[in-house]
Image (cartoon, rainbow, N blue to C red):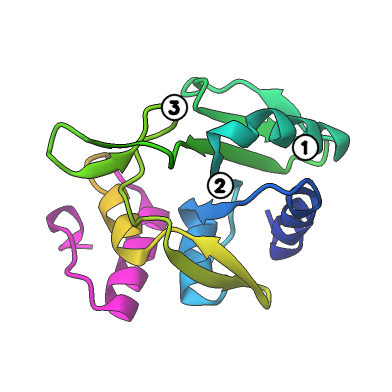
Amino acid sequence: MRASDVNAVLDVLARAGIRVWIDGGWGVDALLGEETRAHNDLDIAIEHTDVERYREAMRSAGFEVVWRGYATTRNFVMADTAGREVDAHLVDRTVVVRDANGVEVYGPNGLAYEVGSLDATGVIAGRTVDCLTAAFQVRSHTGYEHDADDARDVSALCERFGIPVPAQYEHE
């Protein structure tokens, strides 16, 4: 996904009145204010109540649901014939609960985004976008076997925002 592809998707969703938070690799680049690497897809968070309007808006733009092994009712991918993929993560900001670690998260009708994690803005190709905070992005890149893109993303965020480097990335 190029920056122009991201902006095209955001235009479609803006016309449909759907609020979007940029997550994943593009979320990192939005926080950094520049495209730092190639991206296979666009990860976004949307309100769980917007899911049907989201699907309809994306279908009208030529996207269809493609099921991946990790797809759930709260997280799914839509792709078009050009190979552009958008991974939608649903969030339910109407309810706050505590997770197993005592952290306040949004729920229960979406993924467990930490309260406050959706409070950042960034820039993609000159466009100001809502996105996940740098601290949350770093925390969400831990606890799994990471790849070189993850390492670059975490390193860049930690350096730019003065965030301590997580232990699993210390020797990268």
| Total labels drawn | 3
Confirm whether the magenta stretch covers residue 64: no
Q: Which residues are magenta?
A: 145-172
Tell me if residue 108 comes above or below residue 170 in the rendering.
Answer: above
Of the residues tagged 3 and 2, which is closer to the observer?
3
Find the distance from the CA under tag 3 to the CA under tag 1.
21 Å
Graded by Cα atoms within 10 Å as few (under 14), some (14 to 19) or many (20 or more), the crowding at tag 2 reads many
Residue that carries the numbered disc 2 in the rendered image: 44
Judge from the rendering whether residue 128 lies leftward or rightward of residue 53; answer left or right. left
What residue type is disc 3 on? Asn
Residue at 27% across, 71% down: 158
Disc 1 is placed on an element classified as helix
Disc 2 is placed on an element classified as strand
Residue that carries the numbered disc 1 in the rendered image: 58
Q: Earlier in the sequence, mark 3 or mark 1?
A: 1
Residue at 69% across, 64% down: 3
Question: Which label was assigned to residue 109?
Answer: 3
State whether the magenta stretch is mostly helix, strand or loop.
helix
Question: Where is residue 80 drawn, in percent x and y?
Answer: 79, 36
Which residue is nearer to you in this view: 50 or 69? 50
